Image (cartoon, grey):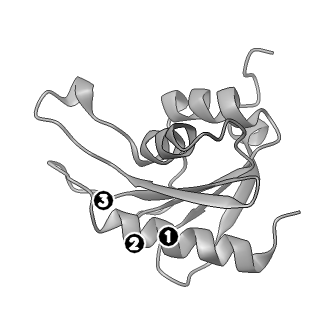
């Protein structure tokens, strides 16, 4: 079970990383991941050739992996949008490193409610 304090630390990191987002569209996104007690952050980085965009979830997971961690325990995504959850491609990465029980949260405003799911709830028919 992940404590409220840890979720709050994760959202703080995610909102801080969101400030560094490079966007060409409308939505800045931040993310933070938890791996064996360590926290890593990331933001979206958009490219003029949109197929090269890096989503905040992938940015945070990449930071985790490049730091030597391989197991994703939880991820939180922050953006000023409603019902904002990872896209299918980001869920692939979450399943790769965290599996179906990985905790996935999102927050739409600083200090707001963190809505939480297990990865398998967001993609219930994901191939085993």
Quarter holding residue 6: bottom right
Q: Are marks 3 and 2 in contact (CB under 8 Å)?
A: no
Question: Badge 2: how crowded within 10 Å, few (<14), some, or many (20+)?
Answer: some
Which residue is identified by label 2? 16
**Is label 3 in a helix, a strand or a loop?**
loop
Q: Residue furthest top?
A: 127
Image location of residue 28, percent across then percent down: 30, 59
Q: Residue at x 69, y 40 (%)?
A: 122
Q: Is residue 60 left or right of residue 6?
A: left
Q: Are marks 2 and 1 in contact (CB under 8 Å)?
A: yes
Image location of residue 12, percent across then percent down: 51, 76
Q: Which label's residue is closer to the chain start, 1 or 3?
A: 1
Q: Is residue 99 left or right of residue 20?
A: right
Can you see residue 80?
Answer: no
Q: Which mark is residue 45?
A: none
**Is label 2 in a helix, a strand or a loop?**
helix
Image location of residue 126, percent across then percent down: 72, 22
Question: Badge 1: how crowded within 10 Å, few (<14), some, or many (20+)?
Answer: many
């Amino acid at each position: 079970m992940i404590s409220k304090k840890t979720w709050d630390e994760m959202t703080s990191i995610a909102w801080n990383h969101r400030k560094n987002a490079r966007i060409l569209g409308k939505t800045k996104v931040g993310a933070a991941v938890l791996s064996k007690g360590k926290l890593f952050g990331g933001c979206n980085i958009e490219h003029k050739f949109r197929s090269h965009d890096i989503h905040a979830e992938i940015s945070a997971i990449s930071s985790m992996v490049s730091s030597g961690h391989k197991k994703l325990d939880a991820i939180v995504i922050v953006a000023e949008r409603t019902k904002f959850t990872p896209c299918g491609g980001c869920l692939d990465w979450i399943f790769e490193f965290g599996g179906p029980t990985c905790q996935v949260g999102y927050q739409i405003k600083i200090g707001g409610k963190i809505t939480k799911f297990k990865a398998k709830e967001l993609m219930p028919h994901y191939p085993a």
